[in-house]
Amino acid sequence: AQSVAQPEDQVNVAEGNPLTVKCTYSVSGNPYLFWYVQYPNRGLQFLLKYITGDNLVKGSYGFEAEFNKSQTSFHLKKPSALVSDSALYFCALLSWGGGADGLTFGKGTHLIIQP
Amino acid sequence: EADIYQTPRYLVIGTGKKITLECSQTMGHDKMYWYQQDPGMELHLIHYSYGVNSTEKGDLSSESTVSRIRTEHFPLTLESARPSHTSQYLCASTLASYNEQFFGPGTRLTVL
């Protein structure tokens, strides 16, 4: 069975500092990985994805993520945090080819950017 | 903003009532999904569809049922709501599995 782990329930960062939200995964076969963000009382918004190719993926709002196969990680990063980045972030793994065709999500990480 | 809509946004009902949560998308996507988001904010796939007349159960067992009679419409029904069904329900669609999914704003259901 495949799984996604987000080891931190909450990450606190001062505005202007770099931020990292951690994600590790477990899957047999090639991983297709996604990051989504959720603002209060809203649905999820897509940030970026890794399917194949360059290990550094750039996405929306200045976010990027680094795929590391040996460490089975896909950490989300941003060089300089904004207060408006405060939200709930989900890492997700696509499951297909024999299982349910949908996303397996991590538990989510609350990102709090302090002014 | 994605062209995927859910109604109602909020619903408070009594135990035993039958309810239908609506989800519609105007992007022509064949693949649609329902996710349940529990109070702890975890998300679990409960239903998905590959297209018209296709429905499958997801990873999390659910007492709800779905139908897909039209490409753009993927309603979820609870025949007899219970307090354990209290949750947020998110609908999503995509063009292909490896593409990003577009999510609706969600329906927050409270069963008393």
Image (spheres, coloured by chain):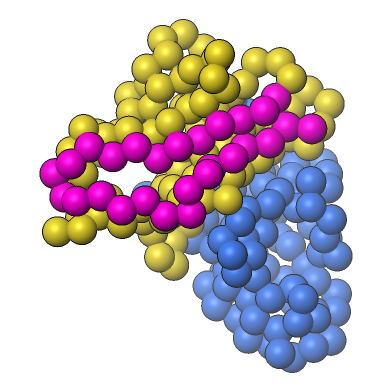
Q: Can residue B101 be seen in this view?
A: no
Residue B104 is left or right of residue A61, and the answer is right
Q: Which residue is drawn at 59% across and 40% down?
A: A5
Q: Where is residue A43 in the image (x, y as percent from the top left)?
A: 48, 56
Of residues B18 and A113, the one drawn nearer to the viewer in this rendering? A113
Residue at the top extreme of this rendering: A53
Of residues A72 and B62, the one drawn nearer to the viewer in this rendering? A72
The question of residue B102 being in magenta is answered with: no
Q: Where is residue A10 in the image (x, y as percent from the top left)?
A: 42, 55
Q: Where is residue A72 in the image (x, y as percent from the top left)?
A: 57, 22
The picture quadrant where one finds residue A106 is top right
Q: Where is residue A31 in the image (x, y as percent from the top left)?
A: 62, 21
Indicate the chain coloured blue by its letter: B
Q: What stretch is highlighted in magenta?
A: A1-27
Q: Which residue is drawn at 74% across and 45% down?
A: B48
Indicate the chain coloured yellow by its letter: A
The picture quadrant where one finds residue A96 is top right
Relative to A26, residue A68 above or below: above
Relative to A23, residue A111 above or below: below
